[in-house]
Image (spheres, rainbow, N blue to C red):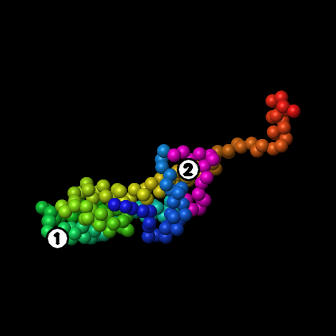
Amino acid sequence: MTSDLSVTNGLDALLRKHRGALAWSPGEVIGEWSRLPPIDDLVALRDGLNVALCGMGGAKAVELTRLLLGCYPVVKPHDPDTYVRALASVFEGLPADLGPMVVRAVSTAKDLLPTRAVVAATCEEAVKPRQDAKRAVLAYLEEYERRRTTKLTVQRATREHVEKVMKEAGYK
């Protein structure tokens, strides 16, 4: 299954604009010389991703579970009510706009009814790009805060300073 960062709440342009910066991984260091995206964009991305990661809730989750069951007209679960509740509990934490993609991915993978674990793994895979983008945004915001609270001391090399250092080192 492929997933992208597209969301339905108007963040698409910002996500495309900063796709390179959002490809950051936790192992990479964001330091004092790292170029940061504009803070206004980062705040908008953080707020938008918080909304985009909200779960869909109960009614929509049950509807998606029934849609998934409808993809298997011949196969019936042993206890349909328990199966629907079990899968709906997984779908509840999934953003609503990713639901149809997950149902499509799960239903085209096998001829047997998917287990709760399979659906949960597919949901995690679908949400991962947004979670990774949010982690990157939070890391950049932390660096902004660090830079704001820590005075970076960078001495500008003026002509007088260079001449002084050269003279002290024995150069004329």
Question: In the picture provided, is 31 more to the left or to the right than 78?
Answer: right
Residue on which the image places disc 2: 142
Q: Residues within 10 Å of mark 1 (few under 14, many from 20)?
A: few
The residue lying furthest to the left in this view is 78
What amino acid is labelled 2 in the image? Glu
Q: Which mark is residue 165?
A: none
Separation of residues labelled 1 and 2 (CA atoms): 51 Å
The residue lying furthest to the top in this view is 170
Q: Tell me the quarter of the picture where residue 159 sits.
A: top right
Q: Tell me the quarter of the picture where residue 130 sits.
A: bottom left
Q: Magenta residues, as a range?
A: 28-44
Measuring 26% from the left and 56% from the top, which residue is drawn there? 118
Measuring 52% from the left and 68% from the top, which residue is drawn there? 13
Residue on which the image places disc 1: 73
Query: In the image, residue 61 lies at what x, y percent?
Result: 29, 66
Observer-nearest of 170 and 152: 170
Badge 2 marks a residue whose secondary structure is: helix
The residue lying furthest to the right in this view is 172
Report the predominant secondary structure element of the magenta stretch.
loop
Observer-nearest of 46 and 163: 163
Query: In the image, residue 23 lies at what x, y percent?
Result: 49, 54
Query: In the image, residue 22 lies at what x, y percent?
Result: 50, 56
Is tag 1's residue or tag 2's residue first in the polypeptide sequence? 1
Quadrant (top left/top right/bottom left/bottom right) for the N terminus: bottom left
Quadrant (top left/top right/bottom left/bottom right) for the C terminus: top right
Q: Residues within 10 Å of mark 2 (few under 14, many from 20)?
A: few
